[in-house]
Amino acid sequence: MSTVNYNLSPLAGKTILVTRSVGQSNQFSDRLTGAGANVIEMPALEIGPPSSWDALDQAILHLSTFNWLILTSSNGVEYFFDRLEKSGQDKNALAGVKIAVVGEKTAQSLQKQNIQADFIPPNFIADSLVENFPESLIGKKILFPRVESGGREVLVKELTAKGAEVIEVPAYESCSPQSIPPAAEYALVNNTVDIITFASSKTVLFFSQLTAHIFTYNPENLARVCIASIGPQTSKTCQTVFGRVDIEAEEYTLEGLTNAIIKFSHN
């Protein structure tokens, strides 16, 4: 998808609040700043290790028994390969295992490990993974390292329904930060934010918890802000939590979200 470019600073005068996980917002913020926006970062997600490594370590020990490894997030990639290395092995342990990834960022993270995915579904979303899977799933053994809590169950159900044996192992956990950066709190209280961006359902939920003390007393502050979502799943959560979503990316990537915001701002 080509980048929308109405002028050199299509988002000039817009203040955009970016809710991403700690340490993951830079690239997106840079895109928005490059388009002229004033960006305020409010990490609404912290990533850390799972409560136990046992299941992942066991799976790594028996990697050769798997047909496929499915990775659906950059965090999944990073934590899986970090753990693989700690076990004394490297990517050669995956020689007989095919890899499927969901999402452009996930594919990029895998490339940083100098590995090309065997299969990337169209649309960058989990729903199209099963529909377009390149071979029969009957009898296939699949390793799925994932977030410990709050992940979507749909993928595992669909793969299992097609005859696969899916081994889910917690590779990382995501939780809510304890506080809001002062600049973000000030902007939300003083009504200076034009657009809030969400790139996952968990950021929506944690943002809602973190800002309850602000919006319970000033619901009108939230009512006048645009809610921007990266894709259908995140939009569903926005609908549940906020009762609406104003902008949804057509291509479910951060570039797609940037383009959607630019397009919306010029309507």
Image (tube, rainbow, N blue to C red):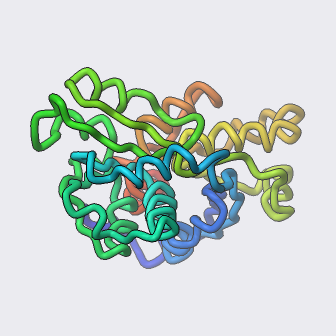
Q: 136 or 45: which is nearer to us?
A: 136
Q: 44 or 264: which is nearer to us?
A: 44
Residue 11 in sight in this render: no
Q: Quadrant of residue 254?
A: bottom left
Q: Which residue is drawn at 50% across and 62% down?
A: 83
x%, y% of residue 133? Answer: 16, 40
Query: Seen in the image, is 216 located left or right of residue 256?
Result: right
What is the residue that sits farthest to the left in this orientation?
135
Q: Residue at x 58, y 65 (%)?
A: 25
Locate the N terminus by quadrant: bottom left
Q: In this view, does 134 lie above or below 40?
A: above
x%, y% of residue 247? Answer: 48, 44
Q: Is residue 229 above or below residue 192?
A: above
Residue 198 in sight in this render: yes
Query: Seen in the image, is 212 located left or right of residue 115?
Result: right
Q: In this view, does 13 lie above or below 144?
A: below
x%, y% of residue 167? Answer: 38, 36
Circle count: 0
x%, y% of residue 191? Answer: 79, 51
Q: Which residue is drawn at 60% across and 45% down?
A: 226
Q: 84 or 75: which is nearer to us?
A: 84
Q: 231 or 131: which is nearer to us?
A: 131
Query: Seen in the image, is 187 located left or right of residue 7?
Result: right
Q: Residue at x 44, y 28 (%)?
A: 153
